[in-house]
Amino acid sequence: MKIVHVAEAFAGGIVVFVKSLVENLSDDEHIIVHGERAHVTRFTDIRKQFARTNARFVRWHSAQRSIRISKDFAAFLELYRILKRLKKQHQIDAVHLHSSKSGFIGRIVCKLLGINNVIYTPNGAPFLVGTSKISNYIYKVLERLGNGFGGQVVCCSPSEQAEYKKVGISAITINNGIPFDRISRISGYDMEPSNKKFCIVTSGRIINQKNPTLFNNIARYFEEFQQFEFIWIGDGPERALLTSTNIKITGWLPGEDVARLISTANVYLSTANFEGLPYAVLEALALRKPVLLTDSVGNRDLVKSCLNGDLFKHHSEAIIKLLQYFNNASMLNIMGEYSAMHGKESFNVNHTFARYRHLYEGNHIENDSYLKPALVNA
């Protein structure tokens, strides 16, 4: 099959997701129509990750993330020309749109070109992104409007699908997945946590969506306790908000170094305001880490009946949980084993991409009903 992926913001988790699709559907041809967010990751660096894959790239020059009518119209015209050319060359069996801007523009273009096999994966509901009720309302209207042009909406977690249902948009869920066996078997990643300090780690861009202020508030409580340290793996425009003296910001690291740091930590902490279904937390599950996550969309699907971690709504709840973990360190190994078991059962890469392949073939699939019992939180 010939699968066209469209992503205006080709960076971060979307790169991980598309790369996984390409690698796990290696018998298919993949054409990636993409923009660039050079301030996050330069495309030349991203392309190296696809060096050994069956993927080729088409640059979508006018695509950008923010809403600007003139530039968005230019992006629309450019994408129309790109997909029209690919269709004429018989290079399209399915179009997979990644993230909200691609989903909106792409569905209009596909409707005009008579391309019917269209899949849209939001990778995080855009109407949860805004900093005000007005902006979130605008995103809801745009999502409803875009949905009117067709295409199958595919959420990457049950809680994200529930948010789409609330705004009147029909969607299915295909959980994100990672190769749990491969990650858990990698030599050197099964190390015991450091005995020097009780280490709490997170990974990702330091941006509002990840709520660095909340992370900082939690860490600040432990400033006077020499036994605790906090590590943020990554970087971003809001790193200045991480002012607590017990926080270490590593900057961006190679994947192996990230896994090694997470392996030697005691707890993985996420303070995100919302997620699609975060790969960083999935990797923490594979690395047998207890997880302490905000009770938010995407995160809440990863805690199984509090056996492998806990959810919290306020920084005081997170502080209490961390103190409990510290004073009952023996239970963390048991929780870590539950993390690996839960992740392997519910977020296995083979299941994820078998279902996407089924969609690419033009088949209808039912929702992931068999996952629901495993995703009930206490």
Image: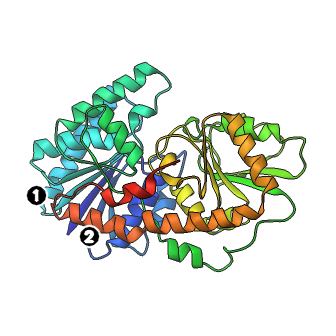
Residue at 31%, 56% (x, y): give it. 369
Count the marks: 2
Relative side of 95 to 251, left or right: left
| Secondary structure found at label 1 | helix
Q: Is residue 240 visible?
A: no
Q: Which residue is mark 1?
A: 88
Amino acid type for the residue under numbered disc 1: Lys
**From mark 1 to mark 2, how far is it between C-alphas?**
16 Å
Mark 1 or mark 2: whose residue is earlier in sequence: 2
Q: Are marks 1 and 2 in contact (CB under 8 Å)?
A: no
Residue at 38%, 60% (x, y): give it. 18
Is 237 rendered above or below residue 198?
above
Residue at 22%, 65% (x, y): give it. 358
Is 366 rendered above or below residue 80?
below
- Which corner quadrant holds the N terminus? bottom left
Q: Position of residue 341 (x, y in %)?
A: 53, 68
Toward the top, the furthest residue is 134
Amino acid type for the residue under numbered disc 2: Glu
Relative side of 223 to 367, left or right: right
- Nearer to the camera, 357 or 103: 357
